[in-house]
Image (cartoon, coloured by chain):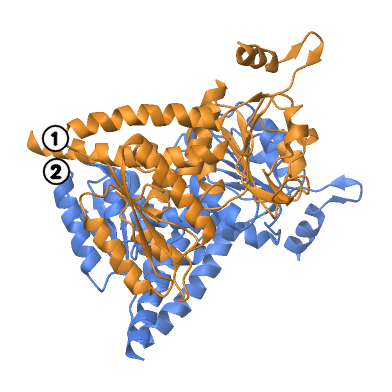
Chain colours: A orange, B blue
Amino acid sequence: MLTLLRHLTSLGHYGGRRSVATVISGNQTSKMLRERLKKEVDHLRTAKVVPGLLVLQVGNREDSNLYISSKLKAAAEVGIEASHVRLPNTVTQEELLRTIASVNEDPSVHGLIVQLPLDCIHRVDVEKITDAVSPLKDVDGLSCVNAGKLSRGELNNCFLPCTPNGCMELIRQTGVSVAGKHAVVIGRSKIVGAPMHDLLLWNHATVTTCHSKTSDIPRQVATADILVVGAGRAEMVRGDWLKEGCVVIDCGINYITDKSKPSGKRVVGDVHYASAYQRAGFITPVPGGVGPMTVAMLMQNTVLSARRVLADVSGASL
Amino acid sequence: MLTLLRHLTSLGHYGGRRSVATVISGNQTSKMLRERLKKEVDHLRTAKVVPGLLVLQVGNREDSNLYISSKLKAAAEVGIEASHVRLPNTVTQEELLRTIASVNEDPSVHGLIVQLPLDCIHRVDVEKITDAVSPLKDVDGLSCVNAGKLSRGELNNCFLPCTPNGCMELIRQTGVSVAGKHAVVIGRSKIVGAPMHDLLLWNHATVTTCHSKTSDIPRQVATADILVVGAGRAEMVRGDWLKEGCVVIDCGINYITDKSKPSGKRVVGDVHYASAYQRAGFITPVPGGVGPMTVAMLMQNTVLSARRVLADVSGASL
């Protein structure tokens, strides 16, 4: 009830005084999504299809270990069979490509992701590795075939990259329609900014992409009905840049010094939350916003991949 | 000298009165490009590499015949061996795919284009056809592999689609630097708008894409330092929408009624030329602007493809 009231009041002025933003919870949204996926997996299992995910890691980066463990945990929760293959940091590009080729051939694996960045003592062409994953198992949506289909608007014929797809899901939660709105994306990375542009565009927003070479980011941000930030710069977007009532999706994960914390640091997004919260209509928190959605969308893509295999098999047996 | 003077005066006010735009000639720029390519082809031929282009047509559309004949003419002019294969409109998708596969294997062909739209009595999946062309011979730059690489900014590792690449060349002719500028693209087609966005973005412009669902195109256009229009609507962009001194690239080819002409019609762009000419700093005419550049860039891609083959062969023989 409180949420509803805050939602309503956030849509405009209330009693002569503008309310604060409605917080879009990634924790809550991803939980609902995982519950839905669990039911789908149960259904697939009755048809003798067990969705399989393989996470391929090179080396032993601590941050990668943490990300992988949260993926394995989410997979277990929804009933996906996940396995984790760790190759030593002495692996060569050729060996890595051979491993990927053999997983591509393995019918029990519906989703294959290569955890980035690679922790490898040899020189490895990361594009080549990403593109070696079969487009039919590329549940990270990072191969150039998937990127090309997305950029051409074939949204139903590819795997959507997990972070931008999670952002779209959070935008949908607000009830704000995307078509015809002006969306501004800050950042043009392969994982966040570039595919986010494509997704917003093919959901019929007018989209502006800003980046490190943009001279007037505050002026661009001021025109945004929907703002997605994936810049990798702690608290760079200030509340007073925002159009009042806009939707703010913050993909940033930055650690800043905070002596009040036992660890001496805390995590913040790319948006200055306290000031943006006063001005936006909807905002994602950090942590608990985009982060948990990324993992949930990876699970969704894996289930989708298994469902496609089932559809092909059913089709063939007709 | 006159051109230089007009160029200088177009940069601002002159004698208290603003001058008109400098016209960017696609005829002239493409002619220079073809001359340069002819020298490159001569050089390749001395190394026993003859650049080969194959144009695959289905059926017998009159407009396709015209486009193909201008491609064959340009190829002959620069010394590319071009062949034209016309399949009957009764061809099936399977037969078409087999033809493409065999051309993919033919080492004498460095560039393969399938002339669109297909004129075929059977149902054919156009994406499937476009994507069947080997990415190494896809000199139209329309396969999803090439689109994906472009959207990720790998400009030197793909074939750039001909029309947007021609637009970039025309923008370069103005001397206006793209980095940090605000570019607005109207249209999101696979052939023009979508790849144009990518090219401008990876040349470091801040880019806004507008399309049929954009509610306020005039307001967006007013912010553009560089405007590229590929909307397919005759004279939709009016001069008074423009930021003074901006660069206007018009990809439109539209026929409108003109009783003063013997044919009863004339060709116009997507920009209302007479009013835009009064306000822009630089403008492309229609015809004689983007059109001839598209064909020239196809020749450039074919030569590039042949050069890559030569580099591979030389590399292998080292």
Dot label at residue A314: 1
Above/below status of A23 relative to B124:
above
Which residue bears the numbered disc 2? Answer: B90
Q: Residue furthest front?
A: A262
In the image, what residue type sits under mark 2? Thr
Residue B25 visible? The answer is no
The image position of residue A34, as x and y in percent, is: 40, 31
Placement of the C terminus of chain A among the 4 image quadrants: top left
Placement of the N terminus of chain A among the 4 image quadrants: top right
Residue A190 is left or right of residue A114, and the answer is right
In the image, what residue type sits under mark 1? Ser
Residue positioned 46% across, 71% down in the render:
A120
**Residue B184 vs residue A304, the one in the foreground:** A304
The image position of residue A296, as x and y in percent, is: 44, 37
The image position of residue B225, as x and y in percent, is: 71, 47
Subunit under mark 1: A
Residue A107 is left or right of residue B273, and the answer is left
Residue B310 visible? The answer is yes
**Number of numbered discs present?**
2
**Residue B86 vs residue A220, the one in the foreground:** A220
Label 1 CA crowd tier, 10 Å (few <14, some 14–19, many 20+): few
Residue positioned 57% across, 23% down in the render:
A174
Q: Residue furthest top?
A: A15
Indicate the secondary structure of the residue bearing disc 1: helix
**Residue B315 vs residue B163, the one in the foreground:** B315
